[in-house]
Amino acid sequence: MFEQNHFKSIDELVKFFPTEQSCIDFLEKRRWGDHVVSPYDPNSKVYKCKGNRYKCKNTGKYFNVRTNTIFENTKVSLRKWMLTCYIVINAKKGVSSVQLAKFIDVTQKTAWFMLQRIQNSFNIDASQCLSGEVEVDETYIGGVNKNKHSNKKVKNARGRSCKDKVPVFGMLQREGFVIAKVVNDTKAGTLIPIINDVVCPGSTIFSDEWQAYRNLDPNLYDHGVVYHKKGAYVIGNRHTNTIEGFWGHLKRTLKGVHHWVSKKHLQRYVDSSAFRYNTKHLSEYERFDVLLQNIGHRLRYLQLKNMVA
């Protein structure tokens, strides 16, 4: 983690990284410490070359601190990358590509691609096991059917219908982490395997009365149900208010900042909101450090372009 005397604001960050070389030196120390490791062969001897490059002896390949990271093969300076990372993770509701483009003086297309690369590093808690008291719930992302033009309205799109919206399933450990996933539907065959994979046996699961949750294994979990249709929202410790609060923040982020997100890219925006929730107890510099621990998730533009919803 960073020392508290490093930087706690954008002004201090800009002073901390006065030159491109200062960014390179910082990232090399952060990534490799005192011993540079080849990304092509961790056991290989490494030779230092000119221009901040290194050579892997065993493979003969050259690399630098950008190799196999979100910064690889971009013309954007590392100073702008550092500033962007700091802005994105510390904006409570995120930042749009239009806003970011103005902040760092790049095109909107470049800003959007940078955002996708950063957000692709936010799924760091995907393997986190939730335990104790866990709330589960689903929400639906998409425009309100009644507000759409007549030729775009979807017929029979009511209740938990997924015809005009994208379902997102979430699991939140009270006083802990939240994990949310974009799903194809909210049937038991979809939700129960996700719960079994993420929630530790012996936990207590709280949900509403949605029929899919009736298939929870009683040998694995205690199950507390809140019957919203009967007007019940809190009965003792039985409620789903915490995860519903998370859904509210997610929707305000999508509607208020990004306005519209396609289904094929939605998971990264969901991960972004989950990252902010899961690091809310950290300071700004600590959150920045957590992101840097996970920058080894390079996302190519063609991957984004060819994604299927």
Image (cartoon, rainbow, N blue to C red):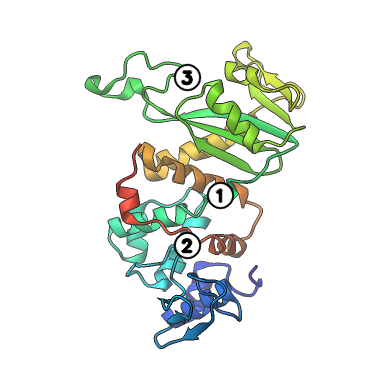
Q: The residue under label 2 is which amino acid type?
A: Cys
The label shown at residue 198 is: none
Of residues 175 and 25, the one nearer the viewer is 25
* Residue 180 pos. (x, y %): 55, 38
Whether residue 266 sits left or right of residue 308 in the image: it is: right
Q: Secondary structure at mark 2?
A: helix
Q: Which residue is mark 1?
A: 275
Whether residue 235 sits left or right of residue 272 in the image: it is: right
Q: The residue under label 3 is which amino acid type?
A: Arg
From the viewer's perspective, is residue 286 above or below residue 271?
below
* Residue 114 pos. (x, y %): 38, 59
Of residues 78 and 215, the one nearer the viewer is 215
From the viewer's perspective, is residue 275 above or below residue 49?
above
> How far apart in space, not on screen, are marks 2 and 1 (Cα)?
13 Å
Q: The residue under label 1 is which amino acid type?
A: Phe
Q: Which residue is mark 2?
A: 85
Which residue does the image show at 36% across and 65% down from the upper left? Answer: 104
Outermost residue toward the front in this view: 58
Outermost residue toward the bottom in this view: 50
From the viewer's perspective, is residue 259 above or below residue 234?
below
* Residue 156 pos. (x, y %): 36, 13
Find out whether the residues at labels 3 and 1 contact each other: C-beta distance under 8 Å. Answer: no
Q: Secondary structure at mark 3?
A: loop
The label shown at residue 160 is: 3
Q: Considering the image in quadrants, where does the C terminus appear?
A: top left
Q: Earlier in the sequence, mark 2 or mark 1?
A: 2
Quadrant in the rendering for residue 283 = bottom right
Which residue does the image show at 46% across and 50% down from the upper left? Answer: 94
> How far apart in space, not on screen, are marks 3 and 1 (Cα)?
26 Å
Q: Earlier in the sequence, mark 3 or mark 1?
A: 3
